[in-house]
C-alpha cells in the first residue's frame, strides 16, 4: 500500500510493533531514537530506494521513530507477503539480511558517536557520511539532496543547536561547507575528508 505523507508526519513511533517493512519511493525519512536520558538522536536520513521497519521481521518493537522530511511517499510491504516472497527467492532474503545488519551497525555507531567523540569530530563525520550517502557532485561542491537544518544536524550528533552552529560556522569560515535555507553544500570534500580522518 502506498502512503503519501506531509512533512513531519510520523510513520512509525519508537516502541511501536509494526507489521510491514517500508520502502521510501519519494522524499526522505528521518530515523531518530530517544536515549534513556531523554535525548533525541537522529540515527539516519533515508531517501528513495531505502528500506526501514526491519524490526517487524523479528517481531520486535521499533528501535527508532520514522518521520517524513518534506512531502514523502512510502510503500508498505506487509511482512506476511514478504515472508512468502523470501521463501521463494533466497537471494533476496540474503540481501535483506545484509541491509538489516548494515542499518543496525550504523544505528549503533551513531548512538556511540553521540556519546563519545568530541563535537567537531561528530559534526564532520556526520556531514561526510551524509555527503557519501546523499550527495550530488556539482561545480560548487557536493550538494546534499535532502533538506537538513542545523537543528536536525544537532539532533544527529547529540548536541545543542548553538554548539553545532558554531562548529558549522567554523567549517564555513574555512571554506569547507556552505549552508542556508535547510540545504548543505560540501564546498571542499577533500578538506572534509581530511578533517574526518584526523
Image (cartoon, helix red, strand yellow):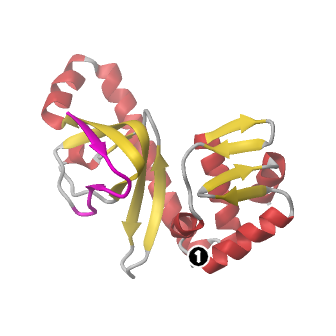
Looking at the image, the residue that sits furthest to the top is: 88
Is 27 within the magenta? no
Q: Furthest residue to the right?
A: 174
In the foreground, 52 or 161 = 161
The residue segment tinted magenta is 1-15
Q: Is residue 12 magenta?
A: yes
Name the quadrant of the N terminus. Answer: top left
Of residues 18 and 137, the one drawn nearer to the viewer in this rendering:
137
The structure residue drawn at horizontal position 57% and vertical position 79%, both measured from the top left corner, is 160
Give the quarter of the image for residue 150.
bottom right
Q: Do we see residue 123 in this rendering? A: yes
Which quarter of the figure has residue 61?
bottom left
x and y, in percent, of residue 143 in the image: 68, 44
Q: Foreground residue, 35 or 32?
A: 32
- Judging by the rendered image, the residue that carries numbered circle 1 is 161
Does 150 appear above or below 52?
A: below
Estimate the x, y position of residue 102 in percent, counting from the top left.
46, 44
**Percent position (x, y) of residue 62?**
27, 57
Q: Place residue 169 in its image quadrant.
A: bottom right
Q: Is 116 on the left-hand or right-hand side of 80?
A: right
Pick the quarter of the image with the C terminus. Answer: bottom right
Residue sitting at x 36%, y 78%: 36
| Callout 1: SS | helix
Circle 1 residues within 10 Å: few <14, some 14–19, many ≥20? some
Give whichever of 159, 186 is nearer the camera. 186
User: Residue 194 location, x and y as percent?
Assistant: 82, 53
Residue found 80% across the figure and 70% down from its top? 170
Q: Is residue 114 left or right of residue 86?
A: right
Q: Is residue 118 visible?
A: no
Amino acid at each position: 500500500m502506498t502512503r503519501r505523507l506531509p512533512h513531519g508526519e510520523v510513520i512509525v513511533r519508537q516502541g511501536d510493533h509494526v507489521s510491514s517493512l517500508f520502502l521510501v519511493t519519494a522524499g526522505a525519512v528521518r530515523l531518530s531514537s530517544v536515549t534513556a536520558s531523554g535525548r533525541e538522536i537522529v540515527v539516519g536520513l533515508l531517501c528513495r530506494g531505502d528500506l526501514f521497519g526491519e524490526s517487524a521481521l523479528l517481531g520486535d518493537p521499533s528501535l527508532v521513530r520514522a518521520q517524513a522530511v518534506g512531502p514523502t511517499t512510502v510503500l508498505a510491504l506487509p511482512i506476511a507477503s514478504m515472508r512468502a516472497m523470501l521463501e521463494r527467492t533466497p537471494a533476496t532474503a540474503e540481501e535483506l539480511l545484509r541491509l538489516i545488519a548494515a542499518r543496525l551497525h550504523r544505528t549503533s555507531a551513531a548512538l556511540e558517536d553521540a556519546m563519545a567523540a568530541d563535537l567537531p569530530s561528530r559534526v564532520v563525520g556526520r556531514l561526510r557520511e551524509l555527503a557519501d550517502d546523499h550527495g550530488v557532485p556539482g561545480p560548487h561542491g557536493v550538494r546534499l539532496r535532502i533538506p537538513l537544518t542545523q537543528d536536525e544536524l544537532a539532533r544527529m550528533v547529540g548536541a545543542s543547536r548553538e554548539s553545532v552552529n558554531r562548529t558549522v560556522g567554523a567549517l564555513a569560515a574555512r571554506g569547507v561547507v556552505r549552508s542556508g535555507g535547510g540545504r548543505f553544500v560540501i564546498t571542499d570534500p577533500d578538506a572534509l575528508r581530511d578533517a574526518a580522518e584526523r
